[in-house]
Image (cartoon, grey):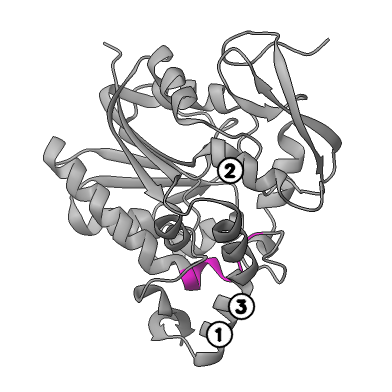
Amino acid sequence: MAKPCMFCGSERFSYLTKIYFQDYGLVEIKECLGCGLIGPEQFIGTGPIKNAYSKTAYFLSQDTAHAGYRNYIRYDAHRNISEGKVFGKFLKKIKDKGSVLEIGCASGHFLKGLSLSCEWDTSGLDISGFMAKNASADGINIACGMFEEVKINPNSFDAVCMRHVLEHMGQPVYSLEKAKDILKPGGVLLIEIPNGELDIQLFMSRDSIVMSPHNHLYFFKIETIKKMLNKLGFGIINITKRNYLQSLRTIGALPSKRDLYGMNIVNGERKLCKLKKRSVLEYFLNSAGFIGKLIMNRDYEAAFEIKITAENNKR
């Protein structure tokens, strides 16, 4: 008998596809007919997830079709800094000073951008020691650890950010509960996730069932994530949807003008530099198959990515 849904407790499911998780095996992906949450039938555990993200190769991958990023720091710096500045301006409107934690912060560039637009204290947590070390070298306060396992005192932060990490977590409901616990009353939660309704369709259109744990474990429909946040005691402030073309730029599959600039190490310091023509060509070629599949199989105006800002309503 299938285990009840971790969110709503329903025992009614629709089985969608199978995934092979590295260091674990073949698992069924199912959709709960009670709340719409889509994820693995079995609990994957922390081991395979740790193995995937703790490897430097995930952020400097030679096989970006299946695993990670070719050079996360180089290609994603400007985009993350820009998005951090935007969120920093939002926080500044709430209060002049506060504390913010980003879960799954990687290189910490989002936090760096945030600190440029407001005077909040910034902290980051990432499972990758490689990324934490790089961020610390850049003057960003980041600890290495798995959010589900790290002990954090309740009511510690005025804001918590989870940008494209919730879908990778083995216990997303518990992670949201913990995020609420470490937020102060009235604190702000920022979530960015793929639109699970389209994300699962794209995944099921692939030719192979082979997929390792550094890809998505859970797929969140808009209504499902809204129900989860409301049930946990969050009041939704704002929901923003990005279409395919906007999302391609966000995830780095389609570079913006700023993304044509990257980060190089010069005399031990990171310097902005314009990418060589060959690098730009490789950037497009590596993304060509992915972009083509999106445009060929989906309405590119559809909402592909969801950004939610919510308030912690606990008193």
Label 1 is placed on what type of residue?
Leu
- The magenta span reads 68-75
Left or right relative to 94: residue 274: right
Left or right relative to 79: residue 264: right
Q: Residue furthest bottom?
A: 277
Label 2 is placed on what type of residue?
Asp
Q: What is the spatial separation of the Cα atoms under label 3 and label 1, in whole angstroms? A: 6 Å
Q: Is residue 45 above or below residue 80?
A: above
70 inside magenta stretch: yes
Quick check: marks 3 and 2 in contact, CB under 8 Å?
no
Left or right relative to 230: residue 1: right
Residue at which label 1 appears:
281
Structural crowding at the residue carrying mark 1, measured as other residues with C-alpha within 10 Å and reported as few (<14), some (14–19) or many (≥20):
few
Structural crowding at the residue carrying mark 3, measured as other residues with C-alpha within 10 Å and reported as few (<14), some (14–19) or many (≥20):
few
Q: Which mark is residue 8?
A: none
Q: Please state the horizontal and vertical placement of residue 129, each as a whole percent of the image.
A: 60, 55
Residue shown at 34% from the left, 26% from the top: 183
Q: Earlier in the sequence, mark 3 or mark 2?
A: 2
Residue at which label 2 appears:
199
Residue at which label 3 appears:
285
